Image (spheres, rainbow, N blue to C red):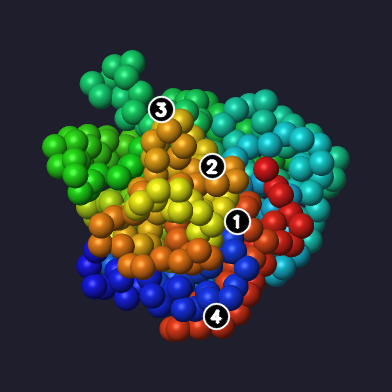
Amino acid sequence: MGQTHNLAYERYRKIFRGERLPLAFVDLDRFDRNIAYVASTQKQTGKTIRVHSKSLRCVALLRRILEKGGDAFMGVMTFTMEETAFLADKGFDDFIVSYPTVQPTDLKLFADLVRAGKTVSLIVDSEEQLERLSRTGEKEGVVLGACMEVDMSYRPLRSSLHLGVRRSPIRSIEDALSLARRAEAYPGVRIDSIMGYEAHIAGLNDDLPDERLKSRILRTLKKASVRELTERRGSVVDRLRQTGLELRVVNGGGSGSLMSTGGDPSVTEVTAGSAFYAPGLFQHFKEVSFEPSAFFALQIVRRPADHIVTCHGGGYVASGAVGADKLPVPYLPQGCSFIPLEGAGEVQTPLKLPESCPSLDLGDPIFFQHAKAGEITERFNEFALVKGDRIVERVETYRGEGKAFL
């Protein structure tokens, strides 16, 4: 274990001595550097950055990004309509709700937000969604904004191979034009934005330290996909504008594709979320680099064998396809590893310690990162905010405010 990591562990151990564990915390020095770094990625492009609240789920930290980031940041991407209304009540505005909904309660909230003067667009990708939105808009006497999502996945050589997530069925120019034409028949809704999320680029590590060959292959595929989707997205946007469609926003990308998406001339803004916490799955990109800033701490409660300690709790496993990469990441002391047959457990998590581990006592913390960003907030009511060598504030997560939106 390097001396730097030893010092980092001792610093955090001292800060949290006497605190109730488990706890979650954010290192503000690192968090603020991530804000500045994300802003810097678009200095040459002139694109603004929309913050994805899903990856934060903490009002105070969302507000901190928008305040410290200044003109570089504009607007919020939310993940449910109820969350959007919650944030609107907190004073936020300019929303894209990034997942469709047709629930009557959600659509009523949508209409209320528009009536209150908030700027909101809801993702759509089908005529059925447009019809339901229009019905609500006509009933409520408002016109609801819709953001058409265009599929950005990669299909090499026009094959059936699909590299990317399964989201929108709108893929081609013809698909987009068809939906735009159908929207004209619905007076209570208007398509005012386009989103194309290249998840297979934005969320896939391509600079893995111990997998150089795999990383080179992934970067090659990414470059080919970026060329294809940039051309296709640009063509879709151009053709829609030629039909007279006025677009307030063309949104694209995520934290791992800030550079490539920002370089797309058809895009007016990029999205970032996970970049600010830099969780376990967002630390090995070739084009971008973020500092881990959000952590949780578990107390050591047992020593079942030499070089093994057991922590209380810890089974905070991420969503997605089941795999070891969805486990939390033991962060400090550096070199700790899971017992393969136990992993991260509901009430106990045993860890193997490295030979160079500092001396650990019962009650001492082990520091982890969640594999993903915002999901850790569903386990904790608050973040302790650390600056320098002390806790400077405690702020509530969505859960701490009594909210669970999905």
Left or right: residue 223 compared with residue 353: left
The residues tagged by marks 2 and 3 sit, at their Cα atoms, a distance apart of 45 Å
Residue 215 visible in the current orientation: yes
The residue sitting at 34% across, 53% down in the picture is 307
Do tag 4 and tag 2 residues touch (Cβ < 8 Å)? no
Residue 391's tag is 4
The residue carrying pointer 1 sits among few (fewer than 14), some (14 to 19) or many (20 or more) residues within 10 Å by Cα, namely: many
Residue 75 in picture, x, y percent from top left: 55, 62
Q: Residue furthest front?
A: 305
Residue 239: image quadrant is top left
Which badge, 4 or 2, comes first in the chain's sequence? 2
Q: Does residue 247 sit above or below 34 in this rendering?
A: above
Circle 4 or circle 2, nearest the eye: 2
Residue 345 in picture, x, y percent from top left: 54, 42
Circle 4 or circle 1, nearest the eye: 4
Secondary structure under tag 3 reads loop
Which badge, 4 or 3, comes first in the chain's sequence? 3
Secondary structure under tag 1 reads helix
The residue carrying pointer 3 sits among few (fewer than 14), some (14 to 19) or many (20 or more) residues within 10 Å by Cα, namely: some
Residue 377's tag is 1
Secondary structure under tag 4 reads strand
| Quadrant of the frame with the N terminus | bottom left
Which badge, 4 or 1, comes first in the chain's sequence? 1
The residue sitting at 41% across, 66% down in the picture is 360
Residue 172's tag is 3
Residue 345's tag is 2
Which badge, 1 or 2, comes first in the chain's sequence? 2
Which amino acid is tagged 3?
Ser
